[in-house]
Image (cartoon, rainbow, N blue to C red):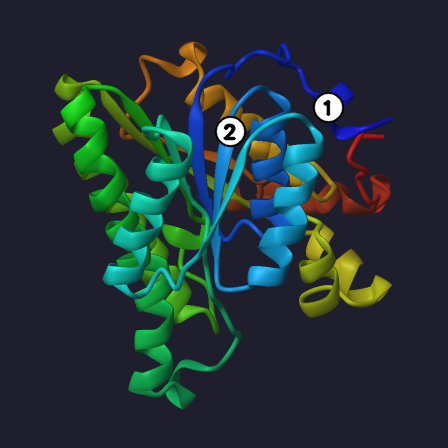
Amino acid sequence: MNAGSRSPFRPDLLAGSVAMVTGAGTGIGKVITLELARHGADVALASRGVERLEETAAEIRALGRRAAVCPTDVSDPKQVKAAVERAESELGGLDLLVNNAAANFIRPSRMLTPVRWNKIVDIVLNGTFYGCLEAGKRMLDRRRGSIVNIVAAYAWTGAPGLAPSASAKAGVVTLTRSLGAEWASAGVRVNAIAPGLIDTPQTRERLWPDETMVERMLKTVPAGGFGSEYDVSNLVLYLASEAGSYITGEVITADGGQSLGKGALDMLESLKPVRRRTVDGK
């Protein structure tokens, strides 16, 4: 079964629209990019990894959609501006921006350095702002557009060892709500998606490389399974479409209830087998 046949949306959902996705070469960003194309959008891809962007762009063109490759370090406002200008020059005015680019590492806070702190904040918070600013100004002039920022469920809970990322993503949440309220009257919506434990090749390698770790992680999720990239991309499609036209300044969490805590459910753990959720949810 291919990704498109799993979608709950009609194939022409975004026909005629132009989107830009940062961090588009791998993981969640790549799936978002391909799903936008499968549903009718032409897509500009932004990331530092040019080779991966070219590979994804080739897949988009094979679907019959246009793709623009925009090598970009989102922490540099000049590069972000150039990327947006290139995207609009090659594809037309942006209808959708997905700020997905991120950086992260796990480290005790007492071992942090200003350089490492600033690197995460520059990419996650500042990079998101630069994208919102450059795309947003153009959307405001046209009085239409949608921006979706990808954050994380720990943005409001914090997370030991993830202080720079949690702090930066908390800033993105507030930025989302601020711009969502400020730009709504001009027809520009700004929302965020907060994924939980999403099973990608990158997370399998870095966060749960063995079954023991898988079991430990899944014990924190009331739904009992990992999410997939498509749980995130489906929300992007929803927010980008007419179905989400009255939603702005909102943060939608997709984490199987993890951020709510399991509480008394822990007592039932022995009665509930730990399972690894597939993309099909089986």
Residue at 51% in and 73% down: 105
Q: Amino acid at mark 2?
A: Asp
Q: Is residue 157 left or right of residue 226?
A: left
Q: In the displayed structure, would residue 27 be above or below residue 260?
A: below
- Report which residue position mark 1 lands on: 4
Residue at 35% in and 51% down: 83
Residue at 49% in and 20% down: 238
Q: In the displayed structure, would residue 55 be above or below residue 202?
A: above
Discs 2/1, front = 2
Q: Position of residue 99 (x, y in %)?
A: 40, 45
Q: Nearer the viewer, residue 151 or 73?
A: 73
Q: Nearer the viewer, residue 140 or 209?
A: 140
**Where, quadrant-wise, is the N terminus in this rendering?**
top right
> Quick one: label 2 or label 1, which is nearer the N terminus?
1
Q: In the displayed structure, would residue 146 be above or below residue 101?
A: above
Q: Quadrant of residue 101?
A: bottom left
Q: Amino acid at mark 1?
A: Gly
Q: Is residue 201 left or right of residue 116?
A: right
Q: Secondary structure at mark 1?
A: helix
Q: Position of residue 87 (x, y in %)?
A: 38, 41
- Report which residue position mark 2 lands on: 42
